[in-house]
């Protein structure tokens, strides 16, 4: 499973708002549309995307399809991302110009010198 894709999908504002509601209660498209104040076709489009990646599932209740979140999949995706972050130690904050060790160090220093010169001239 491509957890990065899942994180990308759930960070879209409309889908995130849908998921927030569906985590609290199962809703049909009409109810989601009314609560979110967006059109039913717009809700359906976002639901289609979420269903395509198994982030939600539908259950027919009467004539309406109600949706609920696949909590396990979202939890696994977020845990995977968290583990990647935890595996790599934090890079220390840059404190001064001498901390630059990238391959473009000379260019960084030239740029910084130009900025400092401009600041002196502006005073």
Image: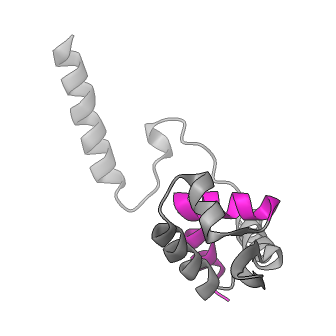
Residue at x-position 31% and y-position 43% = 109
User: Which region of the structure is painted magenta?
Assistant: 1-25
Residue 70 pos. (x, y %): 78, 77
Vertical relation: 113 (above or below) 40: above
- Horizontal arrangement in the rendering, residue 48 relative to residue 90 (left or right): left
Instruction: Name the residue: 34% across, 58% down.
Output: 104
Q: Residue furthest front?
A: 63
Residue 83 spot, x, y in % from top left: 77, 70
The residue that appears at 27% across and 51% down in the rendered structure is 107
Q: Nearer the viewer, residue 4 or 61?
A: 61
**Residue 40 seen in the current view:** yes
State yes or no: residue 19 in magenta: yes
Q: Is residue 36 above or below residue 42?
A: above
Is residue 12 magenta-colored? yes
**Residue at the top extreme of this rendering:** 123
Left or right for 40, reference 72: left
90 lies above or below 55? above
Query: Whole-percent x and y of residue 40?
Result: 51, 68
């Amino acid at each position: 499973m491509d957890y990065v894709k899942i994180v990308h999908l759930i960070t879209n504002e409309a889908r995130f708002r849908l998921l927030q509601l569906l985590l609290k209660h199962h809703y049909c498209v009409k109810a989601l549309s009314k609560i979110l104040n967006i059109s039913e076709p717009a809700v359906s489009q976002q639901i289609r995307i979420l269903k395509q990646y198994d982030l939600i599932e539908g259950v027919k209740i009467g004539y309406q399809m109600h949706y609920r979140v696949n909590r396990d999949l979202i939890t696994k995706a977020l845990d995977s991302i968290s583990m990647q972050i935890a595996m790599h130690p934090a890079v220390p904050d840059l404190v001064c110009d001498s901390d630059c060790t990238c391959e473009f160090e000379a260019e960084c220093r030239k740029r910084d010198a130009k900025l400092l010169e401009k600041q002196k001239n502006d005073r």
